[in-house]
Amino acid sequence: MTITQLKYVLAVAEHQNFTKAAEKTFVTQPTLSMQIQKLEDELDIQIFDRSKKPIALTAVGKKIVHQAKNIVNEANRMTDIVDQQKGFIGGEFRLGIIPTIMPTLLPMFLKTFIKRYPKVKLKIEELNTDNIIEQLEDGHLDAAIAATPLENSNIIERPLYYEPFLAYVPQSHRLQDKSELETSDLDLHDMLLLEDGHCFRDGVINLCKVAKMTADESFALESGSFETLVKLANEGLGMTLLPYLHAQDVREQDRKHFKNFQSPSPAREVSLIYHKSELKMQIIEALRSTIAGIIKGAIAFQDVQIISPLSK
């Protein structure tokens, strides 16, 4: 039994196809098939049911795959130990970032990180929170930046900063004359929201503390971007909430419509998250320290109330 054989098994289990698995592991399909067959012969069991389309795991195959993930992770940990001993910070690092954080945070730290750690090959992907958790658990991401807490026992969360919510209240809105808002002022029925799938949307709904809209209600408008929400608000279709960093990108002439909340201001917790197996910790720590050093100059808010991104 070899680590390479176990990696081939994991690839087939993921893609449910020998040809695709061979492409992903950069070997020929006959080579991959032969190595998996050798492992099955050695263990005297069948890992895959090849009669099914797509290929499926047998009952014992599911147990083998679970154990194979642990073994491959531990083998990777040996490489980590050597890298840490040598003080080496480099290699491929796969980072996921949720859509409501990517456009504002990434430009702030990426250039500095690349310059500081030129041997790290960052692969960055924009993913929603559910996909991030799934890929962290499957080992397809090394770390991610997302709104927390997530209450997942497999995921470690290290807060980077707390980002307050700002209210965008256009002319003629019922709250336009208030200098500061209270959370009790909010009403989901005149709130413009991001479309379903964004954790910031769930945070706003949790903040409003009212039931979600149903399809038969008179008005429900959602969008995939904060920029669109601001434009819709300007058309008199409601108000919206934006994270603090996004608010800094709004046009100068529109900034007069922003209102702060009374302390403690509602805010989201933004964290660097990674699997509890804690692989590639030297790169994770380098990423955390770089972001933390940059962001503290942009957000100085302390008295905040963390709003959970979890759907209620």
Image (tube, helix red, strand yellow):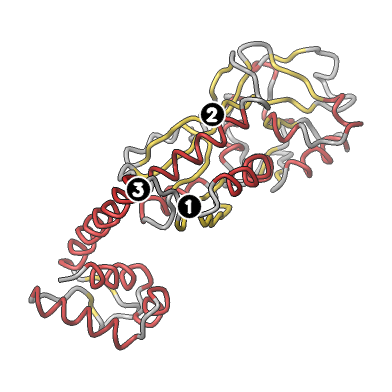
Residue that label 2 marks: 269
Q: Tell me which residue sits at (72%, 45%) in the image.
A: 225
Kindly indicate whether the residue at mark 3 contacts the one at mark 2 (C-beta within 8 angstroms): no
Residue that label 1 marks: 131
Whole-percent x, y for residue 171 in the image:
89, 26
In space, the residues marked 2 and 1 are separated at their CA atoms by 19 Å
User: Of residues 7 and 89, which is closer to you in this image?
Assistant: 89
- Residue density around tag 2, few if under 14, some if 14–19, many if 20 or more, within 10 Å: many
Q: Tell me which residue sits at (92%, 31%) in the image.
A: 253
On screen, residue 237 above or below 111: above
Whole-percent x, y for residue 149 in the image:
45, 31
Whole-percent x, y for residue 47 in the image:
19, 73
Q: Say which label, 3 or 1, has the lower sequence index.
A: 3
Q: Tell me which residue sits at (51%, 34%) in the image.
A: 289
In terms of secondary structure, where does tag 2 sit? strand
User: Of residues 52 and 188, which is closer to you in this image?
Assistant: 52
In space, the residues marked 3 and 1 are separated at their CA atoms by 34 Å
Kindly indicate whether the residue at mark 1 contacts the one at mark 2 (C-beta within 8 angstroms): no
